[in-house]
Amino acid sequence: MKLIGRAARAFTRIADGDLREMGFATGQIPVLVALKHQKALSQAELARIARVEQPSMAQLLARMERDGLVERVADPADKRSRLISLTADAARRMPKAKAIMDKRTGEALEGFSAEETAQLMTLLERLNANLDRMGDEAAG
């Protein structure tokens, strides 16, 4: 686990530098991707997707709204509630950010065969499933 944490911190540090030039941060990626695919979601749904607590998501969304990445829109199903959606500007910049992340991922996996990369992904997915299960058990 120590090595996984080290790799994650190093990748975040490197990718964050590239993304910051575009007005993004790696911590925003789960929110950006979820909104790209779902259009508009509640803060609670985004917290669940990103696997963070509500207060942390509230802070992240406040910064993203301040930076013009997301906007709050009325929920058509409940006028008292607000949904979060991407701004047109953020949606327009996302393909370049994805290209940067893909490039950095490729560099990080340099020297790995296709089979090794697939095996690594399989192992990490299994690890994450175990950790999700452990988290659910601890919460329940």
Image: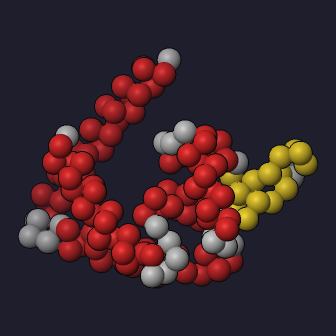
Residue lying at 71% horizontally and 57% vertically, measured from the top left:
84
| Up-down relation of residue 23 to residue 59 (above or below) | below
Residue at the right extreme? 79
Which image quadrant is residue 17 in? bottom left
**In x, y percent, where is residue 44?**
65, 42
Whether residue 31 is visible to the viewer of this picture, yes or no, is yes
**In x, y percent, where is residue 71?**
73, 65
Quadrant, the N terminus: top left
**In x, y percent, where is residue 139?**
48, 22
Residue lying at 68% horizontally and 65% vertically, measured from the top left:
65
Q: How is the image coloured?
A: secondary structure
| Up-down relation of residue 131 to residue 66 (above or below) | above
Residue lying at 28% horizontally and 57% vertically, measured from the top left:
9
**In x, y percent, where is residue 67?**
63, 72
Of 110 and 90, nearer the camera is 90
| Up-down relation of residue 29 to residue 139 (above or below) | below
Of 60 and 49, nearer the camera is 60
110 on left or right of 24: left
